[in-house]
Image (cartoon, rainbow, N blue to C red):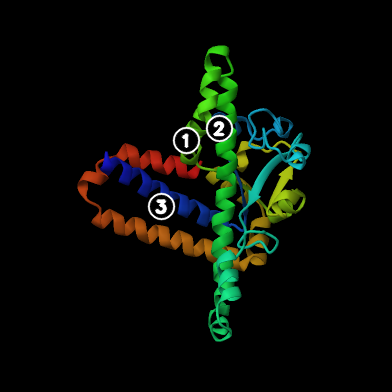
Amino acid sequence: MFPIAVAFSGSHLLFRTAEQGLAHLSGLVTLRHGANPLSWLSIHTIGAIPRFGGCKIGGDSHNKNEKAHAQNPGRFYMAKDADSFENYTGRAKIISFILKNCPKALKERVQWLNEPIKYLDNRIAMRAVPKSYAKRSTARLIEFICFYPHCLKIMNYGIPDFFALSAYLVPSIKFRFSQEKVDTMTPDKLLNEAGCSSTEWISPLNIGLLGTVWNSLTYRTVVRMYDSPTRVFTGVALVAISAATAYYAMLTMPAFIVAHQTAILAGAILAII
């Protein structure tokens, strides 16, 4: 079992990094959406349909925040995947705590850590946000399916929330858009504009590696690459790291792991869709 897990997770991480690198290299913006497994399959098949926003199995269902309910109907929400968000409330809490409590002499020495920690803080946060919505959406889906008299008793034991942890095993849906397209979307005020929403149907051709290729088949790709040198440089670095790691793995990976080609292929497919 362990060799299968290593083969699958290693392949998934490698191809996911390479696929993200290609998106950056093309100057595209990545927006992430977390959903329950059923919605995940539906979005990959027929695309994102905004009129389902605010439904009973949505991530904000049962949310006590009235503002969250009011803004959901007719909209499809996604989290941004930019380098940093100046307005994000959770940013750089670690460095803020250090600067507030350390001596003045030490403050000057650690001040330079503010930007890298803020970058890391935001990157982690914007991957956690879609996962939290996916977990809540999965719990609501389980409750909806089990809403029968003989099943109501299990609701008192947190069973839906327990099984909703499976949502963390389902990758967030990665939508690829040009920066111009993202600029036309509505910022999410509840996330301090670290997310955005669309009232238009989003084609499955905008998802994953297919979305990267589809949105790169235009003359605007060269213009985007020229306008986003940092993003392109990051993409080149990610692709280079993935290629080097794959080459090294082919030379040094034990035979009992390489033998599990089905697990390797499954990890790769799940990473690029």
Disc 3 to disc 1: CB gap under 8 Å = no
Q: Quadrant of residue 107?
A: bottom right
Q: Residues within 10 Å of mark 2 (few under 14, many from 20)?
A: many
In the image, residue 97 lies at what x, y percent? 58, 69
Q: Which residue is mark 2?
A: 138
Q: Which residue lies under the disc numbered 1?
A: 166
Q: CA distance from mark 2 to mark 1?
A: 8 Å
Residue 134 versus residue 10: which sits nearer the camera? 134
Task: Name the element at disc 1.
Answer: helix
Write the residue at 30% across / 55% down: 249
Secondary structure type for disc 2: helix
- Nearest-to-viewer mark from 3 and 1: 1
Q: Is residue 217 visible?
A: no
Q: Residue at position x 59%, y 67% from top?
A: 230
| Residue that mark 3 sits on | 14
Which of disc 1 and disc 3 is earlier in sequence? 3
Q: Amino acid at mark 2?
A: Thr
Q: Nearer the viewer, residue 268 or 162?
A: 162
Q: Residues within 10 Å of mark 3 (few under 14, many from 20)?
A: many
The reply to whether discs 2 and 1 touch (Cβ–Cβ < 8 Å) is yes
Task: Tell me which amino acid carries mark 1.
Answer: Ser
Q: Nearer the N terminus, badge 2 or badge 1?
A: 2
Is 263 on the left or on the right of 174, as rendered?
A: left
The relative height of residue 149 versus residue 69 in the rendered view (above or below) is: above
At which x and y percent is residue 74? 76, 34
In 3D space, how far apart are the residues under numbered discs 3 and 2 (Cα atoms)? 27 Å
What amino acid is labelled 3 in the image? Leu
Give the label on residue 181, or none.
none
Quadrant placement of the N terminus: top left
* Vertical placement of residue 23 versus 65, above or below: below
Instruction: Give the image quarter of residue 41.
Output: top right
Q: Earlier in the sequence, mark 3 or mark 2?
A: 3
